[in-house]
Image (cartoon, helix red, strand yellow):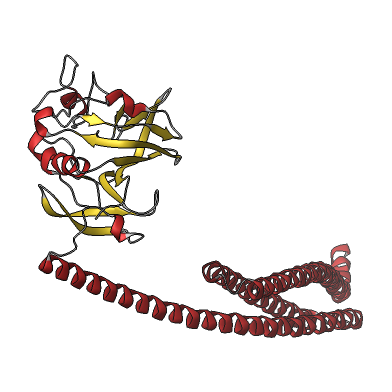
Amino acid sequence: MEELCRSHTYKSMKPLLDYFRQVRNELDQSEIKEKQISEINSDLMNKYHEIVKIHEKQISEINSDVMNKYHEIVGIHEKLMKEAFQLDEYKNEILRKENDLQLCQSKVDKLESDINSQQTTINKLTLHANFLASYDKCKEELSDKSDHLEICEDQSKKLNSSIIEKDEKISRYSATIQNITEHQKIISSKLEERQAMLKKKDKDIEICHAEITKLNRTSHLNIPSSCLPFGEHSGVHEIKVSGVGFFDVLCDSQLAGPGWIVIQQRIGGKENFTRDWATYRKGFGPLDSDFFLGLEKMYRLTRLQQYELYIHLVVLNGSIFYAQYDDFKISDEDHGYALSLGKFKGNIRDAMRFHENKKFTTFDRDNDSADNNCAVVYNSGWWYQNCSYSNLNALYGMYLSWWTEIRNELKEAKMLIRPKEKIV
């Protein structure tokens, strides 16, 4: 009986119990939904604040960057206007500033892309929030957020407008730079035309000079015996010397006045000065590089009258010195082309005096007073004593030198002679 009563009671109460269980489940689900909505709202607020901070930082950076680039462009423009005549420098400056403009444009494009990306993210979050918003309070909050987003959009539009304005200014400055560049090209073109005209005139002068030289050689009249008649006209000229005849010499009017014949020259060429007696007697080397005029020619020139000698020296550090002698001559071949100098003046020690009255020595004719042949030791012919205090024919390096208290290594040397009195 009790069992039947319990069964009947359970059957009667079961619907009510099921109802209670259903109500409890609905309440639990409602709490979960409210919790989810709260979490979504919190997440939206955090995202919103992050977006606002990022947006404000980007706007600040863009404004700062644009203003900096604007000031740089203004500086460039002023500098270009002041230094328009300096063609080479302002070419390089234009190229650098054009690169800056390209970098600025790249940054602006990147920032615009970042803004668009953030705007897309905001739109997606807004749609997601609207989709999940089912309560009036959530709608109001989303409405407030939408207002804030509209403010951000207005600020973004203002920023875009400012960027467009800056782009227009940049375009104007670029046009100005382009106009200056075109003007420079015109100047460069005119300069090239002038240079071409000068080259043509130089060629015409060379042709005239060649014709004059040809006529002089044909007529064999009024051929001078020194460079004095050529005055300030440096370069290669033909002279005539008794016992030698006609030959070309390099005349120089730049180092010590007009009328000098260059008899020896070392200017960095590759001419070999390790030569035998016959070659030093005749002379060797091109007149536009390293050369030695020839002992016989020097003898024939200096036996006619008194000559002075001028030695031009350039040491490795670029310092320039000179040594000058008022009565330079050498003897004939039978006496070994012995050296005579005369009185000295100059801004360096008289190292050449050590070699005065010495015969010329080559590797195949030993006229020095040393135990060994100095020409073999130093690979060059020279007026050696027991070797040298100066050697202008030595190999480039420590032996091409002029002694003072120390050995002065040379990178350039020239020996020039000129008559003491004018003759033709």
In the image, 363 versus 37, the foreground residue is 363
| Residue 346 in picture, x, y percent from top left | 43, 35
Q: How many marks?
A: 0
| Residue 421 in picture, x, y percent from top left | 32, 48
* Left or right: 237 in relation to 39: left
Q: Is residue 224 above or below residue 414?
A: below
Determine the residue positioned at 27% across, 48% down. Answer: 262
Determine the residue positioned at 12% across, 49% down. Answer: 242
Q: Is residue 232 above or below residue 294?
A: below
The N terminus - image quarter:
bottom right
The C terminus - image quarter:
bottom left
Answer whether residue 363 is visible to the viewer in this image.
Answer: no
Quadrant of res 177: bottom right
| Residue 343 in picture, x, y percent from top left | 37, 31
* Left or right: 126 in relation to 10: left
| Residue 18 in picture, x, y percent from top left | 83, 73
Determine the residue positioned at 43% across, 32% down. Answer: 348
Q: Is residue 239 above or below residue 348?
A: below
Answer whether residue 375 is visible to the viewer in this image.
Answer: yes
In the image, 51 versus 201, the foreground residue is 201
* Left or right: 360 in relation to 162: left
* Left or right: 170 in relation to 295: right
Name the residue at the top extreme. Answer: 371
